[in-house]
Amino acid sequence: DTIGADVITDVERAVSGLLKTKSREVVKSVLGFMNMYVSTLDGATLHGELPHVVESLLIWANDTKNRFRLKIRHILEKIIRILGLEEVTKFIPEEHLPLIRYIRKQSAKEKRKRDGSVAGYSV
């Protein structure tokens, strides 16, 4: 009843190849699959696939005419929660580091909010 991790990895590699197409409908579906893929994998398998996943996700990260950047950011946030910021940053190219800095700042802001303090002052 269960599918092996190697089969899922092969499917991911085939599907992520579709991110190179120009069709926005296809890219939207592939990003939905990548979101599910990241959510279902365990940390060890995801760690092994991290370079390929990050490389394929960042193809559309600079496109300004769509909301794919938000989907990509959410997927990267999930990966960071699973593997940690330092591990993911190793595989991010220099031109995409501002995205990682933004994710780090937002998570720190949310943590401060959860802890009940604003700008270092408790409320």
Image (cartoon, helix red, strand yellow):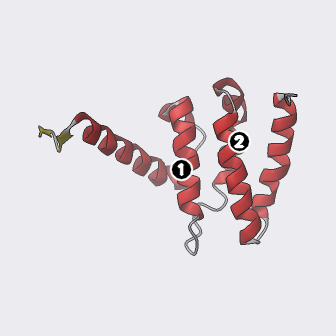
Residue at left offset 68%, top offset 24% = 44
| Residue 47 against residue 31 in the figure, above or below | above
Residue 109 image point, x, y percent: 30, 45
SS for tag 1?
A: helix
Amino acid type of the residue tagged 2 in the rendering? Tyr
| Residue 2 against residue 55 in the figure, above or below | above
Residue at left offset 66%, top offset 30% = 47
Locate residue 99 relative to residue 45 in the image: left or right: left
Amino acid type of the residue tagged 1 in the rendering? His
Farthest top residue in view: 44
Locate residue 25 relative to residue 83 in the image: left or right: right
* Front-most of residues 95 and 111: 111
Mark closer to the chain start, 1 or 2 = 2
Residue 63 image point, x, y percent: 59, 69
- Local packing at callout 1 (Cα closer than 10 Å; few below 14, some 14-19, many 20+) is some
Residue 3 image point, x, y percent: 86, 31
Checking the image for residue 74, the label placed there is 1
Farthest front residue in view: 1
Checking the image for residue 37, the label placed there is 2
Asked if disc 1 and disc 2 are in contact, CB closer than 8 Å, the reply is: no
Locate residue 109 relative to residue 19 in the image: left or right: left
Residue at left offset 85%, top offset 49% = 14
| Residue 20 against residue 13 in the figure, above or below | below
Q: Quadrant of the N terminus?
A: top right
* Front-most of residues 91 and 110: 110
Disc 1 from disc 2: Cα separation: 13 Å
Residue at left offset 11%, top offset 40% = 123
Q: Quadrant of residue 92?
A: top right
Residue 100 image point, x, y percent: 47, 47
